[in-house]
Amino acid sequence: MPEVERVAVPPPFVFGGVLALGLAARRWRGARPRSRSAARITGVAGGAVAALGAALSGAVVRRFARAGTPVSPTRRATALVTDGPYRYSRNPDYIGQALLLAGSAVACRAWWAHILLPAALAFVDRVVVPREERQLEEAFGAAYERYAARTPRWLGRPVG
C-alpha cells in the first residue's frame, strides 16, 4: 500500500495558528475597553459558534470511531464514512474547525483571526482536500466517486 501523501501543516494546526496569530495581534495592538454588555454578547455569541464547531468535529470523530477508520489525515483511511454530517459535506471536520476558530476569535476579540480565516480555508481547500480526495478515490474507487458526485465538498443538500 502506498504511503500517505503528507501536507506541510495539518488543518488543526492551520486553524489553531490563525487563532494564535489573531490573539497575538490583539495583544500587540492592545484591546480597547468594552462595556460589560458588549463583552457578554460577544462572549456568548462566540462561545455558541465555537461550541457548534466543536460539536460538529466531535460528531466526525464519533463517526470515524464507529467505522473503525483513523481521523488523522496522516493515516490511510480504512473505511469510507458517508453518513451523519458526511451526508451534507465531504469535509464537515474542517467546517467544524473553522467554526471553532471563528467563535473563539469573536469571544476573545481576536479580529485579525477573522481576516486570516479565508486564507486558512483556501489553504485547506486547495492543498489539503485535493490530496485527501486523491487518496480516497485511490482507496475506494467507484464508491468514493458516487459519494463525491452526490455530496458537496463544503456545504449543501445531498443529491438524491
Image (cartoon, helix red, strand yellow):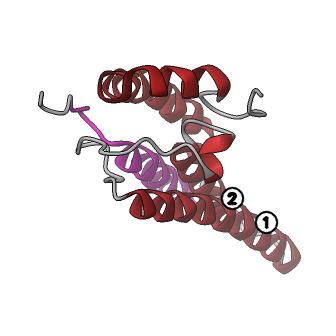
- Left-right relation of 157 to 70: right
Q: Quadrant of the C terminus?
A: top right
State which mark lies toward you, 2 or 1: 1
- Above or below, comparing residue 82 to residue 130 in the picture: below
The answer to whether mark 2 and mark 1 are in CB contact below 8 A is yes
- Above or below, comparing residue 56 to residue 38 in the picture: above
x and y percentages locating residue 7 in the rendered image = 26, 32
- Check disc 1 and report its element: helix, strand or loop: helix
Q: Which mark is residue 122?
A: none
Q: Quadrant of residue 47?
A: bottom right
- Left-right relation of 83 to 160: left
- Left-right relation of 131 to 16: left
x and y percentages locating residue 113 in the rendered image = 56, 46
- Above or below, comparing residue 155 to residue 16 in the picture: above
Amino acid under disc 1: Ala
Residue under pointer 1: 45
Figure disc tally: 2
Q: Does the magenta stretch mainly form a helix, a strand or a loop?
A: helix
Amino acid under disc 2: Val
Mark closer to the chain start, 2 or 1? 1
As for residue 65 lying within the magenta part, the answer is: no
- Residue extending farthest front: 142
Does residue 31 appear in the picture of this structure? no
Highlighted range, magenta? 6-32
Residue shown at 73% from the left, 72% from the top? 43
Residue under pointer 2: 106
Q: Nearer the viewer, residue 9 or 18?
A: 9
Q: Nearer the viewer, residue 99 or 105?
A: 99
Residue shown at 54% from the left, 39% from the top? 91
